[in-house]
Image (spheres, rainbow, N blue to C red):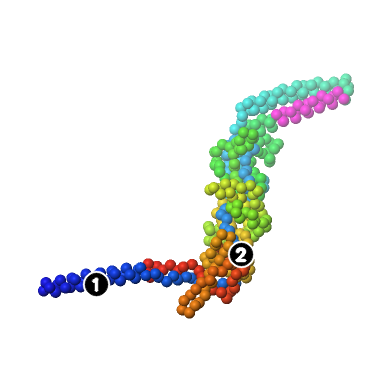
Amino acid sequence: MKKYSKLIIAAIIALIFIGTFVFLWQKSQPKEVVYNEFTPKMEDIRKTTIITGKIEPRNEVNVKPQISGIITEILKEAGQYVQAGEVIAKVKVIPDMGQLSSAESRVRLADINLQQAKVDYGREKNLYDQKLVSADEFDKIAQKLHQAKEEVAAAQDALQVVRDGVSKSNASASSTLIRSTISGVILDIPVKVGNSVILSNTFNDGTTIASVANMNDLIFRGNIDETEVGQLIDGMPMKITIGALQDLKFDAALEYVSPKAVESNGANQFEIKAAVKVAKDDKLRSGYSANAEIVLASAQKVLTIPESAIEFSGDSTFVYLVKSMGDKKDYERRHVITGLSDGVNIEIKKGISKNDKVRGPEIIADDDQK
């Protein structure tokens, strides 16, 4: 029994040894290299580039107050359409104490002058009625009375403007009413009731009450690499894709290329702008991220092959033509002249015909197939 067990173990070891030897021998044998093969085709070639940017209104205006004060009422909301001159908010004036004191003093002085002008007028009228003074002298006194009354009214108006921001004489054009300067959609109202606001002056830009823009006149703004900017021409058509709108596409026309580059991530890029053609029922929003596709060059009905079949050697390009020799295949290296490429296929101007067959890259088998 022990003798048979030893024979079985020896047989198993021998089989393992032989199997290992056969496996290693097979692995050491050179395998036949298999290549993809392509037939040239007559196709259209387009060289395109994709520019990332965003949609924004061509003209966005920040509405600012003409006086400093506190917001007492906001009459509009973001998203509403307003006409030029329409009131967006109201401001309560916080008067400057120096200006207020000066205006009050002016009113008091104007009242004193008016009282004196009335007295002078009464005296002069008595003399005129008695024909003791000429009509010319009486008219001068009457004019002074009229001027004194006008000065009182002007002083009171000035006091009301300083104290309240509005007077009775200019209530319709009050600076306490913040009006839209253009017709359009309100994009944002960054203030709330109770917020203090200041007017624009030499030292600050002033508080923005609202941002208003014409959403029917939109542009695409993005940056293009310096290697491609030389191929751009004003008026070039573009396709704008907005991912947030389920890949909705819009036509656009290039209208501006910056004359100066800006550095971005170590590369020089140029800003571009394109006018977006928007239908009235398209609801675009300011700030949407978008991609613009521009066709930089194109060729129609030209001979093409996959660019992976091209061998680049210095400034020259070559392909390998498939030549059948019985059961075996041979390959002939052929110089070709290439043209436009779209990154996948490339134009062949000279060197092969559409009846040739071209060798492509090597077919790499999966581990399971090996």
Q: Amino acid at mark 2?
A: Gly
Can you give x and y, in whole percent of width and height, for residue 111 in the image?
71, 25
At 54% from the left and 47% from the top, the residue drawn is 266
Q: Is residue 190 left or right of residue 235?
A: left
Asked if residue 98 is among those painted magenta in the image, a careful observer would answer no
Instruction: Depth check: give the residue in front, 70 or 36.
Output: 36
Dots 2 and 1: beta carbons under 8 Å? Answer: no
Q: Which residues are magenta?
A: 136-155
Question: Where residue 333 sits: x, y (%)?
Answer: 54, 69
Give, as a three-letter code, the residue at label 1.
Answer: Leu
- Residue at which label 1 appears: 15
Q: CA distance from mark 2 to mark 1?
A: 61 Å
Characterize the local packing of mark 2: few (<14), some (14-19) or many (20 or more) Cα atoms within 10 angstroms.
Answer: some
Residue identified by numbered label 2: 339
For the C terminus, the quadrant is: bottom left
The correct choice, above or below, for 239 with respect to 179 in the image is below
